[in-house]
Amino acid sequence: MNDQAASHGSWTPEGETLPAVTEEGVIEALKTVFDPEIPVDIYELGLVYAIELEEGGRVKVEMTLTTPSCPSAQELPSMADEAIRQMPGVTDCQVEIVWDPPWDQSRMSEDARLALNMF
C-alpha cells in the first residue's frame, strides 16, 4: 500500500471508508509527545491510563501528570490531542486529565527508568 492510500480512506459505493484507528497507532502517536522537562515520552512515563476507541474514528484518552502542579499541565494534554488528531482515520479526540490513581514512578516503563537513571 502506498503512503497516500495509507493516509486517506477508500471510496466505496456506500461512501468513504476511513482507515482503521488502532490502539497501537494511538500509542505510537502518544510516544511522540515529550514532557518538555523530561527526555521521555508521556506513554513511557506511564502518564497514559486509558485509551478508548469509539465508532467513527473517535478516540478518548485518560492521562495524568506527574504532579497537580506540573508546569506542563496545559501543554501536555493539548500536545497529546494534537498528535492523535493527526492520525489517519481519527475524526475526534478527547484527552481527559485524571488524578486517580495518583501517578508514581512505578508506572514508568523500564526504558523510561533507564533513560532517567531511576533503577
Image (spheres, grey):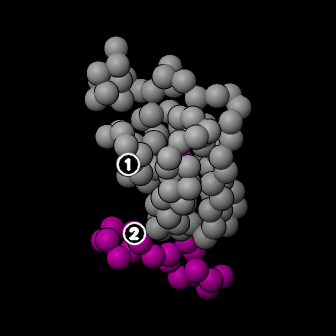
Tell me where residue 78 appears, x and y as whole percent: 54, 60
Left or right? Give the position of 115 relative to 94: left
In which quarter of the view is residue 13 placed?
A: bottom right
Q: Name above or below for residue 66 compared with residue 90.
A: above
| Residue that mark 1 sits on | 36
Disc 2: CA contacts within 10 A as few (<14), some (14-19) or many (>=20): some
- Along the polypeptide, which appears first: circle 1 or circle 2? 2
Tell me where residue 18 appears, x and y as whole percent: 55, 71
Residue at figure coordinates x 46%, y 40% from the top left: 43
Of the two numbered discs 1 and 2 in the rendering, the one whose residue sits closer to the viewer:
1
| Residue that mark 2 sits on | 6
Tell me where residue 61 appears, x and y as whole percent: 62, 49
> Type of residue at label 2?
Ala
Span highlighted in magenta in the image: 1-26
Q: Name above or below for residue 93 compared with residue 53.
A: below
Disc 1: CA contacts within 10 A as few (<14), some (14-19) or many (>=20): few
Residue 74, which numbered label? none
Q: Secondary structure at mark 2?
A: helix
Q: Which of 15/51 is in front?
A: 51
Q: State which quarter of the image contains the N terminus.
A: bottom left
Residue 52 belongs to the span the image colors magenta: no
> Type of residue at label 1?
Pro
Tell me if I can see residue 22 in this picture.
Answer: no
